[in-house]
Amino acid sequence: MDEWLYDLYADLPRQGPGSAEATRRAFQAMQALPTSPRILDIGCGTGKQTLDLATLTDGEVVAVDNYAPFLQRLQERAIAVGVGDRIRCIAADMAALEFPEASFDILWSEGAIYSIGFQRGLEIWQPLLRSAGHIAVTEISWLKPDYPEALQQFWAMEYPAMKSLTENVALVQAAGYRLIEHFMLSEQDWWQDYYAPLETRVAELKKAWEAIAPNKKYSICCR
């Protein structure tokens, strides 16, 4: 990700759609968890969901992202809310995680797996799970068969591997997982802590850039 894009996302409440309630719902759907599960949060960003997970369990949460300043913010926030001793931050590439096999009870990834592709992520992360472990991810999916041409063209460039919800469910099963539950994020989960703050941040940066170079034109397009 370019440095300016990190700057765009750094001060947002979260770096993708979601909410504490959606995180809680997914976590509570998991069955027969150990008392203190070991969790790997992949592509954690500044860790809003990481902190939520730490309040839902007494276990350790290992938070992974490839941008160290995000991890620094997460560590500071974890200490501030009293869970710093249970959150460990590691700078790493989600496509090349160097953990021993069967290291985690839960793999978690909100708004990040698409960076390497849904199918690939499901496959390469699976060895990290312990027996009877769980994985929870959010994935952008087509929900209806027909969409405006402009929207199709955008996603053809942004994420050519994007599939329908039905196709993604099939990929989960083909990768050897047993599907427990899937649900759609609410409209509020997209807007409250993501798109609305993102719009505000884009306006702030645009104003700052125009002050530096008033004769240049900028076009900003965000997911």
Image: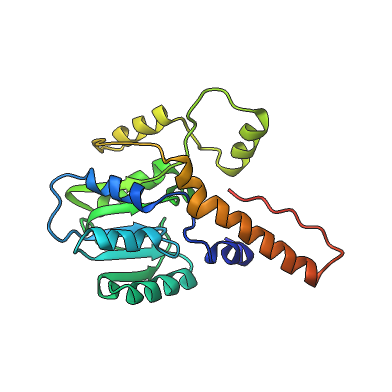
- Left/right placement of residue 131 relative to residue 215 reads left
Of residues 125 and 14, which is closer to you in this image?
14
- Left/right placement of residue 86 relative to residue 160 reads left
Q: Is residue 9 above or below residue 158?
A: below
* Percent position of residue 46, x then y: 44, 65
**Outermost residue to the right:** 215
In percent of the image, x 68 and y 59: which residue is there?
Answer: 203
Q: Is residue 168 above or below residue 205?
A: above
Q: Is residue 126 above or below residue 88?
A: above
**Outermost residue to the top:** 145
Of residues 20 and 74, which is closer to you in this image?
20
Instruction: Answer with the quarter of the image where residue 38 lies.
Output: bottom left
In percent of the image, x 62 and y 61: which residue is there?
Answer: 201
Of residues 129 and 71, which is closer to you in this image?
71
- Left/right placement of residue 51 relative to residue 150 reads left
* Percent position of residue 60, x then y: 23, 66
Instruction: Answer with the quarter of the image where residue 148 lies.
Output: top right
* Percent position of residue 127, x then y: 26, 51
In percent of the image, x 36 and y 53: which residue is there?
Answer: 20
Quadrant assignment for the N terminus: bottom right
